[in-house]
Image (cartoon, rainbow, N blue to C red):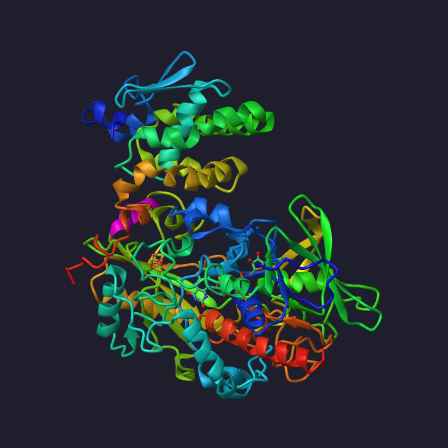
Amino acid sequence: MAKFDLNDESVVVIVGSGAGGGTLGAELALKGVKTVILEAGQRFEIEDFLNDEWASFSQLSWRDARTTSGSWRVHRDFPNLPAWIVKAVGGTTIHWAGASLRFQDYEFRAKSHYGDMQGANLLDWPLSLDELEPYYSRAEDKMGVTRTNGIPGLPGNNNYKVFEAGAKKLGYKEVHTGRMAINSQPRDGRGGCQQIGFCFQGCKSGAKWSTLYTEIPKGEETGNLEVRPDAQAVRIEHDAAGKATGVVYANSAGVLRRQKARVVCVAGNSIESPRLLLNSASSTFRDGLANSSGQVGRNYMRHTTGAVFAIFDEPVHMYRGTTMAGVIRDEAPHNPARGFAGGYEFETISVGLPFMAAFLDPGAWGREFASALDSYQNMAGLWIVGEDMPQERNRITLDPTVKDKFGLPVASVHYDDHANDVALRNHAYRQGMALYESVGATRVFPQTPYPSTHNLGTNRMSANPRDGVVNKHGQTHDINNLFVSDGSQFTTGACENPTLTIVALAIRQAEHIAGRLSANTI
Amino acid sequence: MKTHERKAPAAAMDRRRFIAGSASASAAIFISGAAIIHPGEAWGLEVKTLAPATMQTLVKAARDIYPHDRLSDKYYALAVKGYDAKAAEKPELKALIEGGVADLDSRAMARHGVRYVEIGWEAPRVAILKEIEDGPFFIMIRSGLVVGLYNQKEIWPLFGYEGESASEGGYINRGFNDLNWL
Ligand SMILES: Cc1cc2nc3c(=O)[nH]c(=O)nc-3n(C[C@H](O)[C@H](O)[C@H](O)COP(=O)(O)OP(=O)(O)OC[C@H]3O[C@@H](n4cnc5c(N)ncnc54)[C@H](O)[C@@H]3O)c2cc1C
Ligand code: SF4
């Protein structure tokens, strides 16, 4: 395992070790590039994971202060928990479910395909599906995505059986056990899924892909990658010419260090990445780094989500086995006849009794609520993932009063649903409830969105530097050795779960950075 | 469940009079010195900082907030008993809780002539909780219960939730796809 000097100016420094940062770091290391990953959280291993919802949440999640505003219900229900993001080596790939879908072709051209939508800040990606396809293939291979590369699908669990039966009753055609970054059989030195059912708490069998025990160790083995846990970047520094020179970071005791860098890549997920750029404001860059467009922190997207849970007169035991055990893709295409632009996926979801109590209808109490939980064992559930509209005022800003333990302003997250989001969600609720009713549900619940698990768009890609923060390689328009390497690059959100695309972009970015380094153009 | 509705000669009484209280409308949980005692479930809980009557009311209110007939009072008591120790550390918390319970009781007295715990049916108690649901006392008790009650591993089997499964080898051979009623 490598150990680089703080004054080594030749290293690439990556902030964050999740889907984006962990993949990028390993890819660079494999190409012989000396790389340091700074990770705010600790390093845990598979044996540390807990099959216990609250205990795992406390162990691994980002619980440092954040604030919220806006008309989204999360602001009322969880004012200081806008998002569910992991703070540990491996990032949110420890808690993620593994659903890995490619974007559809037109989703890279949302503005030209959907036309102008009032109040939405739509833009086409400076990148096409054609250009990304080879990287999608490499990402699927790396992550071992089922139903790609000859890997069989996972077996359906009880929750899936109900979902599939309802889908067929409604006449849906494309329903299966998903494209999942979960081994359905041993592969890449990891075993197959044991149907443990705590995918959201870290996979104790290692069947599910996470940068923690796939990419990162592969990178470390090369001797070119050093991962520094307990190292929270607090400021990116630059020289008089406006080039990034290094990153100042703090350990949990507040001790500050400065790692010099040839290139800096930001991959702290879509809330912390813009926060870091904004907190790095200087006399040269008064509005924050890479922010000449004013778009840093704006266009925050979280997918139009929601869930439907249903009670049957017989047991389901939905929590047994893979959390996201299947997908319906029939509603994914753009079909304006439904009354909204974009589409959505249905995916099964389950949570344990403790999270069901907290999230089924936050704040609710009394017999109506309690009687729903009484039927927990007879519940089935699905999740809605739809495209949400980017809006300029949905954004991450620095909170004017609340500071973290290092004295830095925390991120404040503002979100209002767009009318299109509301129309899409209502359509999905109706379809989801109809699906379960068609197979005999006695009670159905359209459930309000959880704190955001998909956080996107706050440093978006644009062809024109005026419209966004980074170019098609994730390189900031303003500073040529500063990159963004996570989901905050997304120009629009599409309706697929984002991580496969984050990983594909990271693989592509690694190629770009390595090429530019050897050509000496950064 | 052992509530006094069953023990009281309710059939002999009209509902109004029963709600309004009578000598026989006694709670399942008794106060005995500095403790609350549940003879039916055979447990007692010593209360040090809060008044025992306050703890008795908290247990009842906890059940009224998340009423599960299959859960004995013990689990509700476990979910709220921590407030006694916390109140010892924080005088403002003690004031909030004692004040909140006193408020419940005065509303109960005004409407039904008895303390909150002595109101016979759930609905009139819930009506009182509804009136205070946006206040800090209720919000604290309710949000504390979401974790304090539902995160007790002992209650999970009663809801058909099996909890930790990795040490059992997951569900791959234990029924992940055993549903056969469709
Ligand atoms: C319960 C759950 C289920 C999910 N399921 C799916 C799914 O099925 N499919 C899918 O595609 N996606 C899913 N996701 C989303 C997926 O996890 C994220 O899209 C993905 O992990 C984002 O990658 P990232 O690199 O942007 O950020 P992350 O993976 O969140 O990594 C960011 C890392 O940066 C660190 N960091 C932040 N700020 C700093 C700083 N200043 N200094 C140092 N380090 C810092 C954080 O601690 C964190 O470790 C799920 C998420 C959750 C919570
Ligand atoms: S269900 Fe499969 S993927 Fe999910 S945690 Fe268990 S073994 Fe891992």
Is A520 drawn above or below residue A448 in the view shown? below
- Residue range of the region highlighted in magenta in the rendering: A369-377
Residue nearest the viewer, comparing A50 with A82? A50
Q: Is residue A100 magenta?
A: no
Q: Residue furthest top?
A: B33
Q: Is residue A414 visible?
A: no
Q: Quadrant of the N terminus of chain A?
A: bottom right
Position of residue B116 measured from the top left corner of the image (x, y, whole percent): 40, 27
Q: Main secondary structure of the magenta part?
A: helix
> Which residue is found at the position 67% from the left and 43% from the top?
A253
Position of residue A39 measured from the top left corner of the image (x, y, whole percent): 60, 56
Splitting the image into 4 quarters, where does residue A460 fall? Answer: bottom right
Residue nearest the viewer, comparing B20 with A371? A371
Is A132 drawn above or below residue A404 in the view shown? below
> Which residue is found at the position 31% from the left and 62% from the top?
A192
Q: Is residue A129 left or right of residue A447?
A: right
Splitting the image into 4 quarters, where does residue A274 fall? Answer: bottom right
